[in-house]
Amino acid sequence: MNMRSTTADRTHADKRLAALLKQAPIEFARAVYGINDYASGRTDTMAAREVARAHRQGMPLTEERAEQRARAYLPTVGQEHCPRCWVVYGHKTPLRFREAEGERPEVAACNVCGAEYATSSD
């Protein structure tokens, strides 16, 4: 591998990480909506279902804990993990990446929760 491709690969990986880091605060907000929906009896929303699933797994989700996890979300190159699984469940679930094709940008997908994140601005 030559120096130019190594630099390009590193730049691409840095852009991926930057895109994923932006998702943690969004997943925190989603968790808060889910906690509030669940507490008020609106259990039919997707966010409330995630909170209920966490409760069933014996990991009750609190706003404080979700905030701590969102702030602590720090994926590394080659070990990118799902922001939603991390914030809601505290699990580091590896992401699968699909390359950009045509009009569709590169996407990181989680096998466990089904979340998909665009990781390129193309």
Image (cartoon, rainbow, N blue to C red):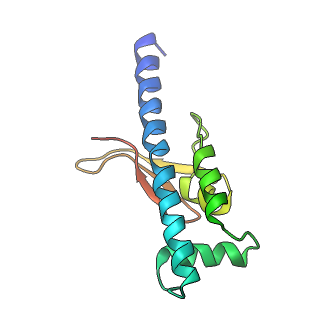
The location of residue 47, given as percent across then percent down, is: 50, 73
Depicted 113 relative to depicted 80: above or below: below
Q: Quadrant of residue 120?
A: top left
Q: Quadrant of residue 5?
A: top left
Q: Which residue sits furthest right? A: 58
Residue drawn 48% across the image and 55% down it: 109
Viewer-closest of 82 and 97: 82
Viewer-closest of 83 and 70: 70
Which of the image's four quarters has the C terminus? top left
Image label count:
0
The location of residue 46, given as percent across then percent down, is: 48, 76
Viewer-closest of 54 and 107: 54
Residue drawn 44% across the image and 58% down it: 116
Q: Which residue sits furthest left? A: 103
Viewer-closest of 91 and 78: 91
Residue drawn 58% across the image and 36% down it: 78
The location of residue 98, given as percent across then percent down, is: 42, 48
Residue drawn 23% across the image and 49% down it: 103
Depicted 66 relative to depicted 102: above or below: below
The location of residue 66, given as percent across then percent down, is: 62, 59
User: In the visual, does 103 lie left or right of 63?
Assistant: left
Q: Which residue sits furthest top? A: 3
Depicted 65 relative to depicted 15: above or below: below
User: In the visual, does 3 lie left or right of 83?
Assistant: left
